[in-house]
Image: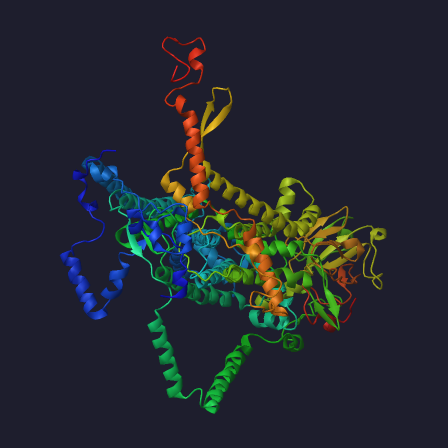
Amino acid sequence: MSIDTSRVATTNTTAATASRPHRIGAVAEWADDRLGLATMAKKNLRKVFPDHWSFMLGEIALWSFVILLLSGVFLTLWFTPSMGETTYEGTYAQMRGIEMSEAFASALRLSFDVRGGLLMRQIHHWAAMLFVASMMIHLLRVFFTGAHRKPRELNWAIGALLLLLGTLEGFTGYSLPDDLLSGTGIRAADGFIKSQPIVGTYMSFFLFGGEFPGDQIIPRLYIVHVLLIPGLLLALITAHMLLLVYHKHTQWPGPGRTEQNVVGFPMLPVYAAKAGGFFFIIFGITALMGGLLSINPVWKFGPYDPSKVTAGSQPDWYMGWPDGALRIMPNWETHIWGHTISWNVLLPIIVLPMLMFTILLLLPFIEAWITGDKRDHHLLQRPRNAPTRTATMVALMTMYGLFWAAGGNDIIAIKLHLSINQITWFMRFAVFIGPVIAFLIARRWCISLQRKDNDDLLHGYESGIIMRSPEGGYSERHLPLSPAHAYRLTARDRDPQVLDELPTGPDANGVEPRSGIGSRLAGLRHRLRVLMYADNVQKPTVQELEEGHHHAEHEHELQAPMEGHAADGHQFDGHHLVEGEKLRADD
Amino acid sequence: MSDDHNHLPAQPGDEAADHGDHGHHGGALVADEPLANPGLPEHAWRPTDVDPAAERRAERQIATLFGLSAVSAVLFVVAYVVFDINGGADGEDVQTIFGLGASNVALGVTLGLALMFIGIGLIQWARKLMSDHEIVEMRHPARSSDEDRAETLQALALGAEESGIARRPLVRNSMLGAVGVLLAPAVVMLRDLGPTPNQVANSDAYPGAGLENTVWEEGMRVVRDVVGTPVRPGDMQIGDLFNAEPEIIFEVDDEGHPVLEGVTLQIAKSKGAVVLVRMLPEENNPAPGRDNWAVDGILCYSKICTHVGCPISLYEKKTHHLLCPCHQSTFDLADAAKVVFGPAARPLPQLPLMVDDEGYLVAQSDFLEPVGPSYWERDSQASTSE
C-alpha cells in the first residue's frame, strides 16, 4: 500500500515525547513544589494499557458505581429514611389519605413531586442492576482468560468481595422505599435470620429493634446503604485499581506482545479520552433507560402491609438464585430436644450462598495448588487452552443459571403452562446433574477447538476452494495462516506431562513416598492434575510444524499445474465461447 | 534474578524477534517454540493521519457531537420547565409520551443524549485524531528486589528487637489480652439494638407481644380485611376464602383514636392476619383435638407462611389448596393445612373458631402455637406441639 506519509498529521508523527506546554507547566510546577507528585505522575501519565473489548467490562462496573454515587446523593436530598407513620397528601391521587411510612411517602414524593426525581430513582435502580451484572461478566472474563493467576490472586479476592458487597448494597437499597414488594423481601429476610440455630431470634430482634417489622429497620438499612457499604466499596475499588496499575494490565499474546512487556496506548491522552468518554456513554445509556424503561414502580405496589402480598413476588435479578434454591429445597426440618432446625431455610439461603462465595474466593488458590504454577502470568489464555478450568466455570454458571431459573418457577409455570410441581422436581435434580453435563460438554468442546487450532497451524485454513485433480478426485484447498495469526495460536504454554508424575514405588534415591494425609492429598492433587491436563491437546512441536509445512508444499506442487487457471469447467457449459480455453495450464 | 522470573514463558522479546534470532535466549522452552515472535506489526496510517481533508472532517464531526450534546442539555432545561410531572396542582391528566410520564421521558432522553454525545465525541477524538502509535512498556516482577526484601526483614527484626516484643512476653501478652478484652465493650454496646425475644414476650408493652403470642384472644371477632366488618357464618358461601384480621386492628377508643397504631399495628398485622375459608363440613378432615374448631365448615388459619413468613392468599377452591406466592409452599386447608408441596415444613397454625352472642365469628383463644417461620426455640416455647 502506498501512503504518502510526508503529509502525516502533526499530532501523530511521534509516539511519545511532547514538549512541555508553557501554562500547564507553570501550574504543574506550582503543584509539584507543594505536593511533589511529578515522580509518581511521570510514570503513570503515559502508562500503557492494552486494547481489547473485553477489558471494558470491569470499566462498566466502575462507571456504574460512579453513577450510583451521583444519583444516590441526589436521592438522599429528598428521601426520608423513617418508618414513622404518616398520611399521604401528595399529588399522586390514588394514594391520598392512605397511611404509610415516611420512607414510602418520600419515595412517592421523589417520583411525583420532584422534577427529575423519578428519572434519578430509575437511573439509580438501572445502574445498580448494571453494576452487579457487569461485575459478574467481568469476573467471568477474568476467569476464562486466566487473568486471576499469579500475581493477581489477591485482586481476584478483592473483586469477589466487591461482588458480595455490591449484592448486599443492592438488597439494602431495594428495601428502602418500604413498599409492599420490598417489605415482603424484608419479611422473608427476617425468616432467614430466624432460621439460624441458637442466635436466630436474638439477631432478628436486635436487627429490627424488637419484633418484626418494628420501626428501626429502614433507618438502619439506610445508613448501611448510604455510608457503610459504599465506603467499603470505595476502599476496595481503590485497592482493586491500585493493584491493576501496579501489576499492569494483562494482554493477549500476539506479535510483539510478550510476558515481559505491555503493548498498547498511553493513559494520557488516549485512555483518558476513551475511558472518560465511556463513562459518559454508560451514564447516557442509564439515563435513557431511566427515561424510557420503568423500573420498580413502587406506587403500583403500595405501602408495606404485613398482611398483604402480591402474586409473582420476585426480588431483583441478582437475588434470584438463592431465592430459587429456597423454592426448590425439600421441606426438611428437624425437631430435636425441644429445638427446631430449619434445614429448609438454613441450607439454601445461609449455607449455600456462603459456600458458593467461599468457592469463588478460593478458585485461583485451588487452581494454583493443582497446577503448582509459581510463575507470573501477564499473557491471557484463550478459554479453550485451559479446558478443565473453562469447564469448571461453565459448570458453576450452569448451576447459577438453574438456581436462578428456579427462582422464577411460578413465572415459568404460568408463561409456559407447565405444572409448578413438575418444574420444582425437575430443578431439584437439574441443579446437580446440569452442571456435570455442562462440564463434560464444555471440556470436550474446548479440546476439539484446540485440535482445530492445531489443524489450522499444520495444514492451513480451509480456503473454501474445491480442487479437482486430473484423476477426478476432489479436495479442498488449504492455505497457510498469516504469520501473525499462526504466532497467536502457538503463543501458549505447553502443559506438564502429568501422566508421568507421582511414582508409586520408591524413587531413584530409594525414598518411599509419603504416607498418611500428605500422600492422600498428593494423590488427590495428582488426580486433579490429570483431569486438568491429561486430555489437552498441545501445540505442535517445531518438527511437527515443519512436517506439516513440508506436506503442504508437496500438495502445492501437485496443484501447481492448475495454478492461475480457473479449471472450474464452466467454460464448457455451452454458454461461453471456448475458443482459446484449455483444460490445463500445460495443454 | 528471582526464581520465578527465570520461569517466565520464554518468548523472544520484540528486539530479538526483529533480528530473527530467537534461539539464543536459551532455555529448553524457547527451542521448543514452533514459531518465533514476529514482532510488533508495522504501524498503519489512518485516513485522518495522511489526508488533511479527512482530518478536518473528523474535527467537524467531533465538534458537531459536542454541539449536539450542548443542545440536548439546553433541551433538558426546557423540558424541566415545560412539563408538569403530575398534571399540576389541580390534578389534571398527566402529560404523557409513549404512555409514560412526559416529564420523565423528556428529561431522560435529553439527559441521556447530552451525556452520550459527549462520550461518543471523546471516543471519536481518541480514535481519529489522537496518536495511535502503540507504545511498549516493560513489565517488572510484582515482587520487590532481594535487597529490598532483606532490608525490610532487617527493619522488622530491628523493630521487634528494639521493642522487645519477643523478649518480653508479659508485656506483649498483657497488651494483646487488653486489646482483646476491648472487644467486649464494642459488642456490649450493640446490646441495646433491641430487646431479647423473652423481654418482649414478658413486657406486655402491647397486645400480643412476643413470638408465641398474637393479639387474638377469646371472643375477639374475625373481621374482614381492609373494611373491618365482622363476619357471620351466613356471609360465606361454600368455597369462599376471606382475608381477615383480628377486630382490634380496626378498634378505636372512646375518643376515636385507634387502639393500635404505628409499630404495634404493624406487629399485630404481621402475626394476626388470617384467612377464613368455608367448605362442606364433611370435606374437612380436622386434626385430632380440633373437632370443634370449625363453625359450619368455616375454618380459620394463620395467613403467615410457616416457611419464611410471607402472607399467603392464593386459594384453589376445588382442592382446598392455599399457595404461597413467595416460594410456592402449598397447604391443604381441608387437611389441617398440612404442607402438600413446597419448602414449608409445618402446617399453618389454626385459630379455633366459635360464634358470639350476636352470631359473629370469634376466636376461642389465641393460636395454640407460634405463627410464622420456624426458629430455634420454637418447640420449647410452643404451648402445644406436634
The image shows residue B376 at horizontal and vertical percentages of: 68, 70
Compare residues B107 and A365 and report the one nearer the observer. Answer: A365
Compare residues A103 and B130 and report the one nearer the observer. Answer: B130
Where does the C terminus of chain A fall, quadrant-wise? Answer: top left
Compare residues B212 and A262 and report the one nearer the observer. Answer: A262
The answer to whether residue B200 is above or below residue B52 is: below
The image shows residue A96 at horizontal and vertical percentages of: 51, 54
Q: Based on the displayed image, in which of its 4 quarters is residue A336 positioned?
A: bottom right
Residue situated furthest left in the rendering: A22
The answer to whether residue B84 is above or below residue A246 is: above
In the image, taking residue B114 as reference, residue A133 lies left or right, namely: right
Evaluate whether residue A530 shows in this view. yes
Q: Residue at x 74, y 68 (%)?
A: A335
The image shows residue B126 at horizontal and vertical percentages of: 28, 46
In the image, taking residue A579 as reference, residue A207 lies left or right, namely: right
Evaluate whether residue A181 shows in this view. no
Q: Based on the displayed image, in which of its 4 quarters is residue A158 positioned?
A: bottom left
In the image, taking residue A118 as reference, residue B138 lies left or right, namely: left
The image shows residue B374 at horizontal and vertical percentages of: 69, 65
Q: Based on the displayed image, in which of its 4 quarters is residue B120 positioned?
A: top left
